[in-house]
Image (cartoon, coloured by chain):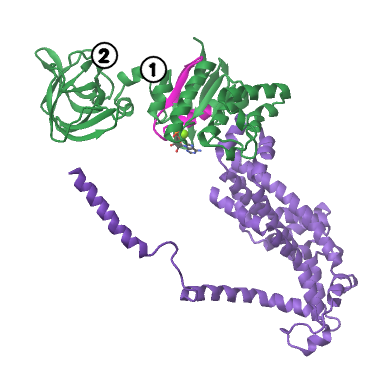
Chain colours: A green, B purple
Amino acid sequence: MNTSVSVKDLTLKFGAITVLDKLNLDIKDGEFLVLLGSSGCGKSTLLNCIAGLLEPTDGQIFIKNHNVTWEEPKDRGIGMVFQSYALYPQMTVEKNLSFGLRISGMDKAEIDKRVARASEILQIGPLLQRKPAALSGGQRQRVAIGRALVRDVDVFLFDEPLSNLDAKLRSELRVEIKRLHQNLKNTMIYVTHDQIEALTLADRIAIMRSGLIQQLDDPMTIYNEPKNLYVAGFIGSPAMNFFKGEIASVDGRPAFVTNGVTFMLDGYRAKGPLQPGTKAVLGLRPEHISVDGPETVNTHQAVVEIEEPMGADNLIWLKHAGQSMSVRIGGNRRYSPGAQVKLAYDMSLASLFDAESELRI
Amino acid sequence: MADQATLNTVAAAADASSGSLSGPRGNRPRPIFSTRNIVLYGTLGLAAIYYLVPLYVMVVTSLKSMPEIRMGNIFSPPVEITFEPWVKAWAQACTGLNCDGLSRGFGNSVRITIPSVIISILIASINGYALANWRFKGMETFFTVLVIGAFIPYQVMIYPIVIVLREMGIYGTLSGLIIVHTIFGMPILTLLFRNYFASLPEELFKAARVDGAGFWNIYFRIMLPMSLPIFVVAMIIQITGIWNDFLFGVVFTRPEYYPMTVQLNNIVNSVQGVKEYNVNMAATILTGLVPLIVYFVSGKLFVRGIAAGAVKG
Ligand SMILES: Nc1ncnc2c1ncn2[C@@H]1O[C@H](COP(=O)(O)OP(=O)(O)O)[C@@H](O)[C@H]1O
Ligand SMILES: [Mg+2]
């Protein structure tokens, strides 16, 4: 596969603040890459650098193997969609779509053809003569996507395009963006702080934190094998349960001990030998814990504290090993507070981190 | 169990409804002669009278003949309405050697105001746009100088400017005065435009750049169409400011180019002959008419323009 966008040693400083620090990123042709991170971690800044709207302090940017570091946004073969839609308020939808083409001096027939094609793909034909003020949020964002579409670009850049929409529209438009990607097969770089969007849309997710990429992998790997404690805690809702303790050896088999409770690590795929005595953090996802199931080497007793029914699922909070933990079970299985339950764990899906380096072991 | 609960709810609802039928409902009535109203309307009324009485006296006096003015009190309406003073003020009043009234000054003021307003707003809006949306070397310095410029009392700069204009050979001409007005309007207008453009969403500007629009395309096709209110505000500030200017008019022009305000002063303060109060009043109203009309026509837009900047920020 060819690389479509390649970022090399990108550094960006606003005065004394370093927002991006020697960041490297290679995106394959036709890939849907999601930049995921909490607010203020530098996602938009990175996207603006790729678009050419911000000048990097240092480093290079390649698009289609062509060094575009010094090129104007319009010459980079990119289209961009913003959170606030950024439609030109005084122009009709049609004029909004064709603005860039008219500026470039394209002939009228070709412009009409492209506008027609984009409005067909996005189903905004009936809206062409309206002004943005007369559109709903979802329609506005569709037009904004259309504006990138008509320019026939190689790379689409999305900066939190769904964050201003309500929950229902958001999930509708999410599916539509995924469909768009499947049909067009363009490279797409998509910025969001919403992990559901990231997990559902991405071919690969880059998790960012204070200007650094923490992990770049496909969604399942990120979910099942987070590289470090931050990624493990960031991905998954409700969040992973963490236990602080240390590695031990029980009958010659590796185990994890916390607060006097022993978790046998049978089935855990460690990256190397597990050294007894190492301080470590065990991470167990709420959905990887079974309640009142068949007995295993790891069967513990715990007491239900709170129950949060969510319809399809039921989330129960338990007191275990001296701390609170959550377990996700089927929506029709109910427990009242105070109930005694038996817990079992699938250690092949657990995560173990070194307490000091916070890296997966 | 469940039935009991339902019954209780029904009973409670019945209780509540019997109380709510007679209780307070909708708008609360307020007495007309409350202290609040008296203070409020009293203050407003006083303020209005304070500003309107002088205007009333001027209009009334300008419509009286001189004998009637000498006889009566200044508040009484004219017994016999005459437009003679207005005609005289406009076309016959003498200043120095010329006896063609304010009409000459009016012409000068128009020829000064229109180009000054257009040029200053054009330049200031482009400056403000560049400062708000584009990064360029020295922009911090430029901005600081402008802010300082907005606060320097301009009497300080009069003499240096006289010398500069003289060296350029345009001292005493209309173009010299137009340049001076343009320069002195620059700091405040640039700040006004910069703040307005900075309050427009930044992503709009970014979108236009991705679409391939450059400096001028973004200015004319994106920014200008969104900025009508602030242009109206700038126009009002400039038209009234330049029209009412006296100091620059006296200092930077020769008598034949004196603006209306300077001529008004010369008519009112002329030492020869009797003081013709009615002519003076008419001349004063005539001079103030242009800003007055501007306010009336654009008042609504003015308020909207200021509000637009405030709300969007
Ligand atoms: N123009 C700017 N000047 C100074 N700091 C900025 C500027 N733009 C962004 N930042 C800072 O850079 C960091 C990253 O911002 P951004 O890329 O917008 O984050 P996000 O991941 O939420 O999109 C933030 O801490 C922000 O305060
Ligand atoms: Mg952002």
Q: Please state which of residues B44 and A259 is positioned toward the viewer in this rendering.
A: B44
The reply to whether the C-beta atoms of the residues labelled 1 and 2 are less than 8 Å apart is: no
Residue A260 seen anywhere in this rendered image of the structure: yes
Please identify the residue farthest to the left as the structure is shown.
A251
Q: Please state which of residues B7 and B210 is positioned toward the viewer in this rendering.
A: B7
Left or right of residue A238, residue B244 in this image: right
Locate the C terminus of chain A and report the quarter of the image it occupies. top left
The residue at which mark 2 appears reads as A271
Q: Is residue A13 above or below residue A203?
A: below
Left or right of residue A356, residue A45 in this image: right
Residue A213: within the magenta? no
The residue at which mark 1 appears reads as A218
- Amino acid type of disc 1? Asp
Q: Is residue B113 above or below residue A132?
A: below
Q: Please state which of residues B252 and A101 is positioned toward the viewer in this rendering.
A: A101
Mark 1–mark 2 Cα distance, whole angstroms, equals 19 Å
Q: Do the residues indicated by labels 1 and 2 lie within the same chain of the protein?
A: yes
Chain letter, disc 2 residue: A
Q: Secondary structure at mark 1?
A: loop
Chain letter, disc 1 residue: A
Which residues are the magenta region? A22-49
Look at 73% across and 87% down and name the residue there: B73
